[in-house]
Amino acid sequence: MTRTALFHSALALALAFASSAAAQAPDAAQRLAREAVIVDTHIDAPGILVGHWADLGGPVPDREFDYPRAREGGLDVAFMAIYTSAARDEDGSARQLAHQQIDAVEALAARHPDRFALLTSPGDVERLREGGRVLLALGMENGGPIGDDLAELERFHQRGVRYITLAHSGNNRIADSSYTLEKRWNGLSPFGREVIAEMNRLGIMVDVSHISDAATAQAIELSRVPVIASHSALRHFTPDFERNLSDELATAIAAKGGVIQIPFGNAFVNPQAAADTQAYFRAIGEFDRRNNERAAAGEPLEDRRAFVAKWDAEHPSPPTAIDAVLDQIDHAVKLVGIDHVGIGSDFDGVDGNLPEGLKSVADFPNFIAGLQARGYSDADIRKILGGNFLRVWAQIEAGAER
């Protein structure tokens, strides 16, 4: 058997396996998953591609996104998250890593032009998804790769980046993070304000996920066009967890014409998991502070990996039902209206800590079935699955001044 024949045989087996998993969803949910345009605005595949290459054009069982399961789940547009950590920003390697991840996504699409296509405009969705291709768009998670050079925004736009999450787990040159106890800028930095203006000019979506409340409010006010939250749940269910959006900020995003993309990860939708996540960032922040003091005093450093491993062992992710995600959707719709809610799963970015029934991109029919059971019409479900986000993306693209 040739290498090509082996690949197609494995692909057929993977599709059959995925089909058996998704078949648990009612026929009506499976049909809508096939017919609707499903857009997931946050999948963390690129970082994994760079660290441990896997051919996502075929079955990769230990990942949450691959082509066979994407097709079985009905996924049409997958935003690949170009993620760089706060540590990469500090040591100056963020920009190089971001370009390496973009290279990896481009290589994946080039390797399988019949299965993937790169997407840079919402107007190209219908044309490019013909033939069952999954469209790969790019979002940058953390503005660190920009450095302090506004010209980098245009360079990344030319490479296909269409949204940028202004900060991630640490304060950076642009904005304060929701995770840090000590805020550097009390919101946006002066440079961050320039970044938002330039993103508006280029048509890059401003993403307020991960940033502080003050930074979010300022970004909404400053932006000429709608802003998005690419993967943010609502704080209504997770009190004191700043990573999730307050009702007030969610309402402001909607009033600006934007969209809130609800994630699936337990850490966002399960109150205990959210509390543990908040506590972890406080603990690791204190750990890093102690190590900085040790370094300044010339003393041996504590083992950060050992600290994290011990924390994880003592704080396992609690079992979470799919209803936790559906409850988030319900609250968001009641709060801001059906036209301002979408999905940004965070697949491959939460260490597998996901609700039952939402373990991979094959499981979108289960999500749809849950919405149908709660009385949502198919027209409204189509909006949540992707229609709302594509509308907002088109508005932001139209507002560009290039």
Image (cartoon, grey):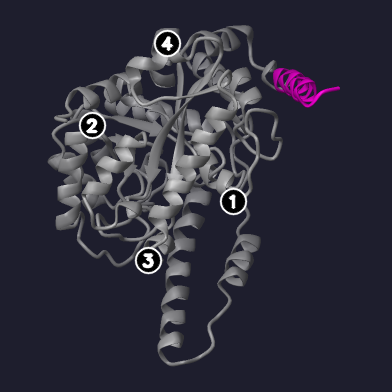
Residue ID for mark 3: 90
**113 vs 153: above or below:** above
**Of marks 3 and 1, which one's residue comes earlier in the chain?**
1
Q: CA distance from mark 4 to mark 3?
A: 41 Å
Q: CA distance from mark 3 to mark 2?
A: 27 Å
Q: Residues within 10 Å of mark 1 (few under 14, many from 20)?
A: few
Q: Amino acid type of disc 4?
A: Arg
Residue ID for mark 1: 51
**Of marks 2 and 4, which one's residue comes earlier in the chain?**
4
Residue ID for mark 4: 127
Which secondary structure lies at badge 3? helix
Going 37% across and 66% down the picture, which residue do you hit? 90
Q: Nearer the viewer, mark 4 or mark 3?
A: 4
Q: Amino acid type of disc 3?
A: Glu
The reply to whether discs 3 and 2 touch (Cβ–Cβ < 8 Å) is: no
Query: Which of the 4 image quadrants contains residue 15?
Result: top right
**Of marks 4 and 3, which one's residue comes earlier in the chain?**
3
The reply to whether discs 2 and 1 touch (Cβ–Cβ < 8 Å) is: no
Asked whether, in this view, residue 279 is left or right of residue 3, the answer is left
Chain part drawn in magenta: 1-19
Q: Amino acid type of disc 1?
A: Gly
Residue ID for mark 2: 203
Q: CA distance from mark 2 to mark 1?
A: 30 Å
